[in-house]
Amino acid sequence: MTSLQSLSLNIRHLTAVHRGHGGDFEHLLDYEGFRYHLLLQFNAAEPASPENLALETLYNAMSGDDDNEIEAAADKCLNFLWPFMEDDFASRSESTVPANEVIKLQVLTVGGVLRTVNHKKSLEYPPTKPVDNTSSDVPVFPSSEIERLAEPKMHIFKIRLPDHSIYCLKTVHRTGNNENFIREVSILRRCSHSNIVHLVGVMVDGDGRVEGMIIDWVENARLLRDLKSISAEECERWTRQIGDAIMYLHENELIWGDVKAANVLIDMGGNAVLIDFGGGYTAGWVDVKHQHTVAGDLQGLERIISFMKSRLV
């Protein structure tokens, strides 16, 4: 989450669940030592309620499979909840020691009046567990030796290793799906291509189980998805680089999977770097019938090229 309120406080966003039309928005976070489980639930009794308006924005974004819009809509829901959480926090004595229990806070309209209530829903955290290390050829780094410098996205960290080198840590909790995490590690460990993010190693806990993958940190990276204007030279270069990387994958009997402009980074040198090999597909980029296939990767490539051409200047 990129909520402005979180920039100046000791806040850790833990996990979130966004459900489709008519569903709920849930967000779990630590706020200055207090753990809050925030909830927006569609209010059928008050169709025009402000919580429904916030949720409708999220539903529309999810139906369009637009990552930018989904993130903005989720932030809108979180920002809607934020002042109520702050009021709850302020009402607690400064001498109160944060309890182990989770504060379950829901905001809803009752009789035309917006109020907070305690809900009874549960949200498991962490959503996933560390996995067995089955990649003996991948370097291993104990979690105790890794310094986390920043968390630009939930469960994505900028880290420093003992040799002072800077990398990116993507934890097993990022996707909420162990199979996606294992798939990504298994693919990246077999890759060595300048336009595919490099797997440096894995982070393990005290029991030797894998908690995250360590990959290149791309400083000041831009998502291809976010570029509003692209020159003809850039379009030609990135088309070649992305195409070469996909061909490399296929020659090694590997599939990228979730091919889309949001999964292409542009580094400081102006080169394209493929990321996110957890699988799946995104409607509008790859048809469901082509997911996890060569045809799907090629279809996604054509749509990325069309996306870039639509922004030519």
Image (cartoon, rainbow, N blue to C red):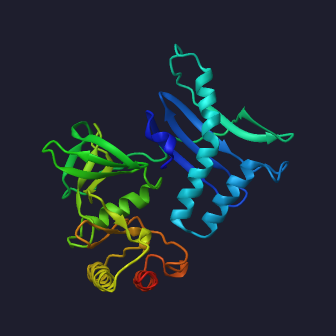
| Quadrant, the C terminus | bottom left
- Left or right: 304 with respect to 205? right
Question: Is 244 situated above or below 145?
Answer: below
Q: Quadrant of residue 217?
A: bottom left
- Left or right: 26 with respect to 209? right
Q: Quadrant of residue 256?
A: bottom left
**Percent position of residue 35, x then y:** 53, 32
Q: Write the residue at 27% across / 70% down.
A: 196
As rendered, which of 278 and 64 lies closer to the eye? 64
Residue with the most extreme front position: 313
**Percent position of residue 154, x then y:** 43, 49
As rendered, which of 226 and 301 lies closer to the eye? 226
**Percent position of residue 59, x then y:** 66, 61
**Percent position of residue 95, x then y:** 52, 13
Q: Write the residue at 58% across / 53% down.
A: 74
Q: Quadrant of residue 259?
A: bottom left
Residue with the most extreme left position: 163
Q: How many marks?
A: 0
Question: Is 75 situated above or below 185?
Answer: above
Question: Is 271 situated above or below 149?
Answer: below
Question: Is 231 situated above or below 87?
Answer: below
As rendered, which of 130 and 18 lies closer to the eye? 18
